[in-house]
């Protein structure tokens, strides 16, 4: 644990939280909400979701049911009042000019997501889809032609990543920053990529102003990404699902690999699968937790068990977690991960906004 402090001692809370602590102000930025161009300039209010010293944000996976793209993500943040995000790489790479994902033409509205551990069979997916897991089910069997198209896409994408100009990345960062939004993590999930592509992931994330790159936790992934994180002076940040329900599972072996290894602690998955209070993990590993994914779930002994529900209707001790972070002033981001079914007549942006307000009332 002490080794981690050496890696963090020169990073102030202000640096960790970026520029989002500034008071909300009116600025001129494009009216977005479309993926084929920008509309005329108009006045908008910069969002500010720093509440009681706790930086509230969202993983942009929360808006997977909505039209994608950097421009739309900015609009969703503005509407939900979010000033800091964990950005999914597919939206960023689309802005940067990545080759088109052929799977989108096979009946999927958005690039496919990887499955959670233990849910269905491993899915065949394009390299670098970069999405967190979605519940259950197997993907339709691809035809030989579709498999060939995916293989070509993977190779084209690999070659494209070697040539991405950093000035284009800076353009993306400027769009977010001008709108009052900080990107604190980019979710590339690159542990199975080539060395050149992993290096690209950290370069791009750093150029976006992020502190690290996220992936799913696992021994191979941690050992693969840690040296690249060290090289770039960043963090390799790892997300858990339900591993803690497995007897003997611990963060300790992963954290020993490098002080650059950090945790994206999913409090909802942890509580839903174990019934243990998330604060037990947060207190123990607070100096190695970079961010917390927040969701409301039922516990493992409830009926139905371990199920995503609208915030306030589940058993996840959300208020306890938030008030602990507020009291201790630990520089840990709290990101909404919207996984419960969107109610009829609503949409993902409106639901994320409800979650923001839920946390604001607790922290105010």
Image (cartoon, rainbow, N blue to C red):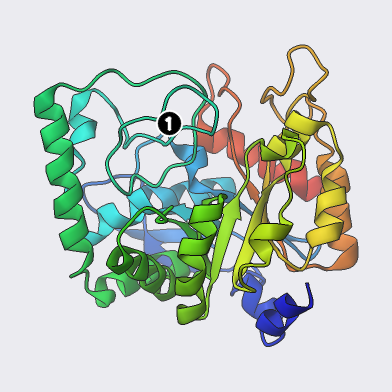
Give coordinates of residue 69: x percent, y percent. 33, 48
Quadrant where the image shows the N terminus: bottom right
| Residue at 69% across, 36% down | 269
Q: Who's the residue at 85% across and 37% down the image?
A: 276
Give the residue at the far top of this rendering: 303
Residue 364 location (% of width, % of height): 84, 55
Q: Is residue 320 above or below residue 111?
A: below
Residue drawn at x 21%, y 57% as measured from the top left: 158
Residue 49 appears in the figure: no
Tell me where residue 57 sits by quadrant. Answer: bottom right
Read off the residue under disc 1. Answer: 65
Expressed as whole percent of the image width and height from the top left, the position of residue 116 reads 52, 33
- Circle 1 packing at 10 Å, graded few (<14), some (14-19), many (20+), is few
Count of marks overlaid on the render: 1
Q: Find residue 267 and report its image quarter.
A: top right
Frontmost residue, 31 versus 199? 199
Res 64 seen here: yes
Q: Position of residue 234 (x, y in %)?
A: 53, 75
Q: Nearer the viewer, residue 41 or 202?
A: 202
Pick the residue in front: 151 or 271: 151
Would residue 325 appear left or right of 186 to someone viewing this image? right
Give the residue drawn at x 29%, y 18%. 140
- The extreme left residue here reads 145
Relative placement, left or right, of 332 versus 31 is right
């Amino acid at each position: 644990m002490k080794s981690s402090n050496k890696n963090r001692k020169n990073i102030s809370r202000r640096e960790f939280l970026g520029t989002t602590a500034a008071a909300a102000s009116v600025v001129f930025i494009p009216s977005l909400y479309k993926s084929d161009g920008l509309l005329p300039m108009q006045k908008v209010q910069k969002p500010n979701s720093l509440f009681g010293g706790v930086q509230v944000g969202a993983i942009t996976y929360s808006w997977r049911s909505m039209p994608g793209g950097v421009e739309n993500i900015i609009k969703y943040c503005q509407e939900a009042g979010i000033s800091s995000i964990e950005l999914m790489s597919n939206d960023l790479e689309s802005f940067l000019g990545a080759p088109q994902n052929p799977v989108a033409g096979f009946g999927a509205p958005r690039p496919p997501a990887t499955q959670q551990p233990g849910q269905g069979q491993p899915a065949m997916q394009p390299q670098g889809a970069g999405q967190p897991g979605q519940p259950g089910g197997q993907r339709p069997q691809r035809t030989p032609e579709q498999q060939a198209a995916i293989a070509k896409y993977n190779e084209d994408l690999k070659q494209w990543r070697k040539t991405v100009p950093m000035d284009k990345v800076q353009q993306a960062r400027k769009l977010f920053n001008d709108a009052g939004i900080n990107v604190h993590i980019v979710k590339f999930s690159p542990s199975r990529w080539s060395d050149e592509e992993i290096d690209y992931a950290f370069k791009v994330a750093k150029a976006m102003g992020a502190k690290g790159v996220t992936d799913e936790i696992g021994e191979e992934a941690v050992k693969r990404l840690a040296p690249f994180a060290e090289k770039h002076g960043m963090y390799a940040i790892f997300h858990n699902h339900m591993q803690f329900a497995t007897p003997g599972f611990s963060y300790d072996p992963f954290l020993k690999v490098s002080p650059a290894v950090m945790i994206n602690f999913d409090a909802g998955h942890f509580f839903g699968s174990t019934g243990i209070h998330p604060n037990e993990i947060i207190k123990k590993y607070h100096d190695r937790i970079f961010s917390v994914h927040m969701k409301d779930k039922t516990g493992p002994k409830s009926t139905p068990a371990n199920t995503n529900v609208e915030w306030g209707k589940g058993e996840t001790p959300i208020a306890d977690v938030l008030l602990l972070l507020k009291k201790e002033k630990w520089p840990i981001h709290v990101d909404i991960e919207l996984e419960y079914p969107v109610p009829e007549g609503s949409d993902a942006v409106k639901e994320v906004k409800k979650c923001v307000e839920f946390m604001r009332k607790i922290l105010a």
